Image (cartoon, rainbow, N blue to C red):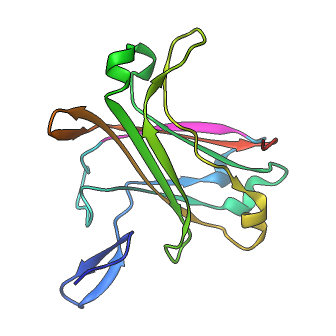
Amino acid sequence: MACPVGLVADRGTNTCVPCSLDLTVDLATFQNCGNRSFVIPPAPSGPDSCPDQTWVEVINLDTIGACLGLSIEVGVPGQEGLDEENCALHSTSVGAFDPAFQTLFAGGGVGALSTLPPETCTFPPTPSILTQVINGGLHTVRLQVSAEKDEGFTPVKLPVVLSLAEVADVQ
């Protein structure tokens, strides 16, 4: 049985069910357009219905109040210490989905060394989730995130550094 993104086949019921969550982030715990970073290991710590995928649920989007949106950044641990050659071997991806698994946005790409000091391996930015979406009734979003290093023919999954920031100004 083929299932859409974010869902996996449940052989017992012959239906598609949501993938297990690797992390839940409650925005109600953020204060004054705050931000937080999380490191998510590439291997699940317990039973996982989608062990090759990393899923994060962000809840209580409606609590960001005066902030204009939610900025989402994905990176790899130690990206500050990567040289240009190693940086280009790393890539990240992120997809944001509403509770019905309709795509809100997708992005990512290969790392590039910043030209301004301090030299840091950076990854393509992703769009912010704007309050227009939140004010439209969206209270929860699911993110599928990944980070990999190209090791020849087989990409190696890496821990994901997920940074969420409530933003007061969207450019």
Furthest residue toward right: 66
- Relative placement, left or right, of 55 versus 168 is left
Q: Quadrant of the C terminus?
A: top right
Place of residue 169 in the rendered image (x, y in percent of width and height, measured from the top left): 81, 41
Query: Does residue 93 show up magenta in the picture?
Result: no
| Magenta stretch: dominant secondary structure | strand
Query: What is the quadrant of residue 50 in the picture?
Result: bottom left
Furthest residue toward bottom: 13
Q: Quadrant of the N terminus?
A: bottom left
Query: Which portion, as a residue range, is magenta?
Result: 34-41
Query: What is the quadrant of residue 11 in the picture?
Result: bottom left
**Image height check: is 126 above or below 13?**
above
Place of residue 118 in the rendered image (x, y in percent of width and height, measured from the top left): 56, 10
Place of residue 116 in the rendered image (x, y in percent of width and height, measured from the top left): 60, 12
- Relative placement, left or right, of 132 versus 76 is right
- Relative placement, left or right, of 70 versus 26 is right
Q: Residue at x 26, y 51 (%)?
A: 44
Q: Judge by depth and name the residue closer to the eye, 13 or 169.
A: 169
Q: Residue at x 39, y 61 (%)?
A: 21
Query: Does residue 37 show up magenta in the picture?
Result: yes
